[in-house]
Image (tube, rainbow, N blue to C red):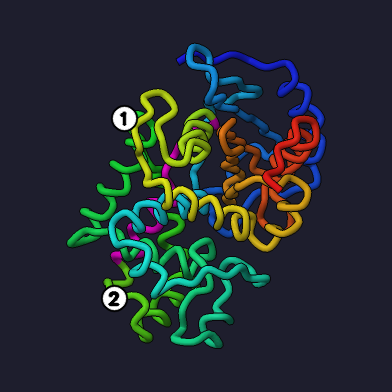
Amino acid sequence: MGCKTNAELEEIIEQAKILTKDGKVADYIPALSNVDSSSVAAAIYHIDKVSNPCTYAGNFEQKFTLQSISKVLILALALQDRGYQYVFNKVGMEPTGDPYNSIIKLETSTHSKPLNPMINAGALAVTSMVKGNNAEERWHRIKAFVECLLDGKTITYDKEVAQSEYETTNLNRALCYFMKQHGVIESDVNELIDVYTKQCAIEMNCLDLARIGAVFALNGKDPVTGEQMIDNEIARVCKTFMVTCGMYNASGEFAIKVGIPAKSGVSGGILGVVPGKYGIGIFSPALDEKGNSIAGLEILKIMANRHHFSIF
């Protein structure tokens, strides 16, 4: 695949990099705290350029874990496995102004149904819907699905990060037990946490993320072969959740200032989709108070203003 540096993207990164000093890396997961907070990298997959589809700036090959970005991919897989009605009978479609790991809405909502698949409670419920007789089978199906989106590229997960999350994720366990009590989750909680922490610890670089963004930008089609990898309607649903819930409780502001489907993770990654044009992958681990990459947000704001990205 052709890939080249981009002077404009380099300039934007240098402009945004200044903001990293105002952010903080995620330290509630111990293994995520050991990163250089000043790192900034980005890649753009241009779906209309067959020979040289990718441009990049910074160390775009540096690997990072997906964390909450994985929620979008697992939602697509669960919808393919179980169908629209099954998934949304157990998980809602509404944004929330509460933190992504809050338990409050579970206690007050009808049937303890998580509000949406992009908060932790909803994502845990969705992961439990991936087909498989046990944790190992579910994990291998998730791995195979993500590798398919990357044109067969083998992926790995960061075992240290996964283990660190598994050992410290007591709040997620509490969410699971609460939902199991009310029939939202049926699987074994520790097996579910095992799969969930592995999916969050999937490693990739900015270019990998940009390629996945390109699949969504093409309504589920592979940008090279044209094969329908994700059903068109499923891709639409996933992109809608990215707009309404993808940037935690800053999603409304992001929709106004940038206006594209996007999903962030506390490792500092952002998956961006400009429908019909680009897939975008960004990594910068310094986060703002809402858990979004502070430099990554600035990069997308600058690019959106210059190139009129907004879908609205």
The residue at 39%/58% (across/down) is 196
Question: Where's the N terminus, which quadrant?
Answer: top left
Residue type at numbered disc 1 = Gly
- Residue 292 in percent (x, y) is at 67, 51
Residue for badge 1: 152
Residue type at numbered disc 2 = Glu
The residue at 37%/47% (across/down) is 231
- Residue 302 in percent (x, y) is at 79, 35
Reading the chain from its start, which is encountered first: label 1 or label 2? 1
Q: Which residues are magenta?
A: 191-206
Q: Which mark is residue 186?
A: 2
Q: Is residue 226 above or below residue 138?
A: above
Q: Secondary structure at mark 2?
A: loop
Toward the viewer: 25 or 128?
128
Structural crowding at the residue carrying mark 1, measured as other residues with C-alpha within 10 Å and reported as few (<14), some (14–19) or many (≥20)? few
- Residue 134 in percent (x, y) is at 20, 61
Q: Is residue 285 above or below residue 17?
A: below
Q: Marks 1 and 2, Cα distance to the nearest angstrom? A: 32 Å
Instruction: Give the overall secondary structure of the magenta segment.
Output: helix
Structural crowding at the residue carrying mark 2, measured as other residues with C-alpha within 10 Å and reported as few (<14), some (14–19) or many (≥20)? some
Q: Secondary structure at mark 1?
A: loop
Question: Is residue 282 inside the magenta stretch?
Answer: no
Toward the viewer: 106 or 169?
106
- In the image: residue 253, left or right of residue 98: right
Taking the image as drawn, is residue 58 in sight? yes
